[in-house]
Amino acid sequence: MATPMLDPELAKTPDQKVACVLLLDTSGSMQGERIAELSNGLRTFKEEVLKDGVAASRVDLCVITFNSEVNVIKDFGPVENFDPPELKAEHQTFLGTGLLEAINRIEDRKETYKAMGIPYYRPWLFVISDGLPEGEEPEVLEEAKARLKKVQDRKGLVVYSIGIGGVNLEKLGEITGSKPMALSGMKFNELFSWLSKSLEGVSRSKPGAQIKLPDIHWATMQS
């Protein structure tokens, strides 16, 4: 394994961290209201996290988008350093490639925490998509599923998968290894407000402790 990269930014706030990756679908089917509301939701998320001083210092955020390319629009670091972009929807849905990028980033970040002696909570991976994989090689998706399952089996990651529109929740759940939820309408602001409050609760707990998350009013869970 390569020597982990040390991060001077982490040294400024060496208290425990909760790594959170937002993996966002920006494929062509997200055009129009969906991509606009997703962009608005990201701004809401930043505003909500920064209202809580503890969460602001402990949430370690990475934001990745995927269509026919995967782009890390914000690598791990403080939420205050995130400048939410106006997202653009185009091309196909390389979900497997996006998942592999997210897993790699999370595993590397955990090694950095260990090298710097920084305690951390179980990382969160938040997947938002309105469609199933399209355009990438099948073996890429299979590799992503296998690696995701391996990490989840050893309790190295918490995964939330959110389906937009008429996405096949059963298939999305099979891919992500989590029980998917369907966003009600365009409640992206409610979704990201919930995420920020959940991360606030995690950041104030002891690493490994069970916490009660806020009630979900923005989605329906697959039965």
Image (tube, rainbow, N blue to C red):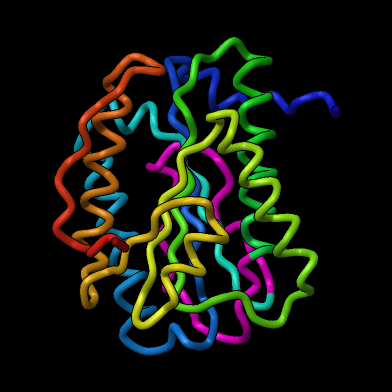
Task: Please state the horizontal and vertical placement of residue 215, each as a whole percent of the image.
Answer: 14, 46
Question: Given the current orientation, which residue lies at the most extreme front position?
Answer: 223
Number of marks: 0
| Horizontal arrangement in the rendering, residue 97 relative to residue 223 (left or right) | right
Q: In which quarter of the view is residue 186 placed? A: bottom left
Q: Residue at x 32, y 33 (%)?
A: 56
Task: Please state the horizontal and vertical placement of residue 70, each as a whole percent of the image.
Answer: 66, 66
| Horizontal arrangement in the rendering, residue 61 relative to residue 109 (left or right) | left
Q: Residue at x 67, y 78 (%)?
A: 68
Q: Magenta span has 115?
A: no
| Range of magenta residues | 69-95
Q: Residue at x 32, y 26 (%)?
A: 203
**Relative to 207, does residue 141 appear above or below in the rendering?**
below
The quadrant of the image that shows the C terminus is bottom left
Q: Residue at x 54, y 60 (%)?
A: 174
Residue toward you, 14 or 169? 169
Q: In which quarter of the view is residue 40 placed? A: bottom left
Q: Magenta span has 87?
A: yes
**Relative to 109, does residue 92 appear above or below in the rendering?**
below
Residue toward you, 181 or 9? 181
